[in-house]
Amino acid sequence: MLNESRLLAVAGFPVGHSRSPAMQRAALAELGIPWRYFRLPLPPERFEETVRALPAAGYAGLNVTVPHKEAALALADSATPTAEAIGAANTLTFGDRGIEAENTDAPALIAALGGSPAGKTALVLGAGGAGRAAAWALREAGAQVSAWNRTTERAKQLSDELGVAHADRPRAAEIMVNTTSVGLDGTTDPLDALHLAGLEPPPVLVDLVYAQGGTALAAWGRVGGSHVVDGLEILVRQGALSLESWTGRVAPLATMRAAVQDGLDID
Ligand code: ATR
């Protein structure tokens, strides 16, 4: 089956800047699997009908990104407990059992930490989809999680639904995960926006935001001696887990990392 010609894609809207095609093509080439990986811009109103047509068109699976992660879970025939709990899926696999939904963002975060978070305190900043995935993953892995968000109501809702604590303001923690979009524009000061001024950088700092040259938050952590995990490493890890689900092969992490960092793209 791996030597048949099958198709994969990343679906999003917009999806033009996704690094998944470069990363997954490099991985498939390294593994000697002749599958092709496309970029699929899909407006929300076309998402479901298009995805349902993909298996018959030769697709083995799909990566799903903004804004389709909830819709991907909703249309699937089955879903992993992780995807169900988070309420979103970033990976679909097409097989004999229909459309299977999975969330590899959550295990990717844990894998990227470089050690078990069990028993450690963790602070999740942000209460959007990425915040839910991070809070759930850390709680499942045994961390003592609290969640803070600019809009308090959203953090409270996340805390109630996922069984983690609510933080009314950011406090010191052994693991800090920024899941907000702060830092994406390169101008907002994350220490101000996230109320971190006055706190020591944590032992482990994860910033899901990626910026060329690194984010200001990551720089704060590095200067303070944090072990910093950036958004690209999480991208690599979630993509690796998706590839393993589709192919059953061990993903070549170093190749994927190199492809993402080069910004290589052969579109
Ligand atoms: P996603 O699903 O990708 O996590 P989202 O639902 O748009 O995206 O969430 C974005 C997150 O960034 C939210 O937690 C948002 O806080 P609010 O819920 O208060 O909107 C946070 N965010 C965006 N800009 C921010 C800023 N300038 N300061 C603090 N938090 C910000």
Image (cartoon, helix red, strand yellow):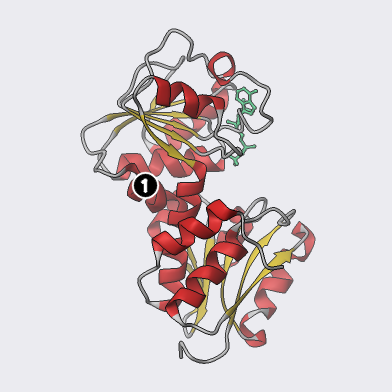
Q: Is residue 111 above or below residue 224?
A: below
Residue 211: image location, x then y, percent: 60, 37
User: Could you tell me which residue is drawn at 56 percent across and 71 percent down?
Assistant: 25
In the displayed structure image, the side of residue 81 where residue 77 appears, left or right: right
Report the residue that reaches farthest toward the left.
Answer: 119
Q: Residues within 10 Å of mark 1 (few under 14, many from 20)?
A: some
Q: Is residue 178 above or below residue 20?
A: above
Q: Is residue 79 visible?
A: no
Figure quadrant of residue 185: top right
**Split into 4 quadrants, where in the image is the C terminus?**
bottom right
Q: Is residue 134 above or below residue 70?
A: above
User: Could you tell me which residue is drawn at 66 percent across and 28 percent down?
Assistant: 186
Q: Which residue is mark 1?
A: 112
User: Could you tell me which residue is drawn at 25 percent across and 31 percent down?
Assistant: 120
Question: Which one is nearer the viewer's eye here, 247 or 28?
Answer: 28
Residue 261: image location, x then y, percent: 54, 51
In the displayed structure image, the side of residue 103 where residue 45 appears, left or right: right
Residue 153: image location, x then y, percent: 56, 24
In the displayed structure image, the side of residue 99 where residue 267 appears, left or right: right
Q: Secondary structure at mark 1?
A: helix
